[in-house]
Image: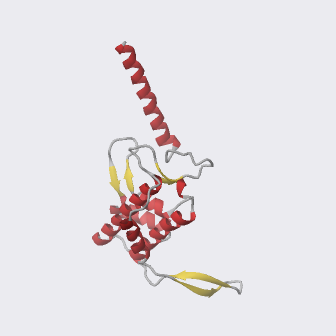
Amino acid sequence: MEWLCIDFLNSDWRDWRGSGRRENRLEKAEWLDSFLQHWDLQAPLPAGSKTCAELLALRESMRRMTESVVRREALLSDDLAALNQALALAPSHPQLLEDAKGGYRLEERCPVGGWELVMARIARSFADLLVYEEVSRLKICDNPDCQWVYFDESRNRARRWCDDKMCGNLMKVRRFRERQKEKESRKSGK
């Protein structure tokens, strides 16, 4: 299951292998364009400096909220207010339309567009995740170098890493090597 808000949160990329390299993908027009296309959103590129700052502030608030949810702590009121402010950027209303089969359907209409609508949709995705999904499935990769946010769809909700083949294997190898060092130091210390 893909989530707009999780994709947005992971725009703060960190090298999972431990090099310390980090990349703010919100500053990269190519990443933003791909992100907008993937989620069928429209906004002018490149994003202005004010917009970039607003996107970054929203991401930071959502990251703190995610960390609170993962630790099963209450959300900070400032972060909740920031999310609600983003939700308010794009008020919408239902509109009754005829469908092709002679029936009717309701569609949500929003009078604003651009980056305001993008931020509101991101915030709505995050709010929907918190309200309608099992929040214990929202997790952060146990690899301290990665910190990728993911939605755990495993049956027993026991996933610890964003990807077992990458971060999972890396962490297992690190633990194995640590145990080997401990054995060697005990042998040499006797």
Quadrant holding the C terminus: top left
Coordinates of residue 117 in the picture (x, y in percent)? 43, 76
Residue 158 position, x and y percent, is 56, 45
Quadrant of the rendered structure where residue 78 is? bottom left
In the picture, residue 18 is in which quadrant?
A: top left
Q: What residue do we see at 48% from left, 70% from top?
A: 124
Residue 94 lies, with reference to residue 18, above or below; the image says: below
Residue at x 44%, y 63% (from the top left corner): 34
In the displayed structure image, the side of residue 167 where residue 58 appears, left or right: left
Q: Is residue 117 above or below residue 169?
A: below
State which quarter of the image contains the N terminus: bottom right
Q: Residue furthest top?
A: 190
Between 5 and 186, the one lying in front of the other is 186
Give how far across and how far down residue 27 sits, in percent: 32, 62
Residue 189 horizontal side relative to residue 159, left or right:
left
Q: Nearer the viewer, residue 128 or 166?
A: 128
The percent coordinates of residue 89 (x first, y second) are: 41, 78
